[in-house]
Amino acid sequence: MERAGTRAGHQYNLLGHIGSNASGVIVEPYLITLTEASDVFPTFQHGGIETIYMLEGEIGYRHGENIHHLSPGDTLFFDADAPHGPEVFTKLPAKFLSVISYPQNT
C-alpha cells in the first residue's frame, strides 16, 4: 500500500498495528521499499518518534538539517516532528524497517 501523504513509488507494507491500549502509545511498524521509480521526499513531518533500521541498499536520509548515510545494519532514531525522509538514493533498491510511535488521542 502507499501510505497517505507519501510520494509515488514509496511502497509501505504495514507489518502490524497497536492501536488504542492502556499504555497510551500507538505503534506502527512498516517495511518500506524504494526503487528506481521512487521520488526523493525529505520533508515528511508527523508527531511522535520514529526508528529506521536499514535492511538493503544505501540512502541519504534527512532529519532536520542533517543528512545521514544509511546502509544495511544502520539505525536512526529521531523526533518525527522535524522534516525527515529519504533525500539521496545511493544504492537501490533500498529496504528499511520504520517503526513509528505516537501518543493516542485522549
Image: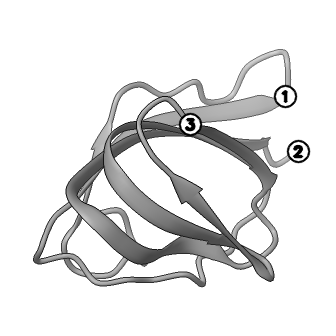
Quadrant of the rendered image containing residue 99: top right
Query: Observer-nearest residue: 66 or 18?
Result: 66
Residue at label 2? 106
Q: Say if 101 sits above or below 40 in the image.
A: above
Question: Residue placed at 27% from the left, 52% from the top?
Answer: 94
Query: Observer-nearest residue: 52 or 70?
Result: 70
Q: Say if 56 sits above or below 63 in the image.
A: above
Image position of 95 (left or right of 47): left
Question: Residue placed at 35% from the left, 62% from the top?
Answer: 3
Image position of 78 (left or right of 51): right
Q: CA distance from mark 3 to mark 1?
A: 29 Å
Question: Residue placed at 78% from the left, 30% from the top?
Answer: 25
Q: Say if 89 sits above or below 49 in the image.
A: below
Colour mapping used in the image: one colour
3 and 2 marks in contact (CB < 8 Å)? no
**Residue 24: image tag:** 1
Q: CA distance from mark 3 to mark 2?
A: 34 Å
Q: CA distance from mark 1 to mark 2?
A: 8 Å
Quadrant (top left/top right/bottom left/bottom right) for the C terminus: top right
1 and 2 marks in contact (CB < 8 Å)? yes
Residue at label 3? 74
Amino acid marked by disc 1? Gly
Image position of 73 (left or right of 51): left
Amino acid marked by disc 3? Asp
Label 1 element class: loop
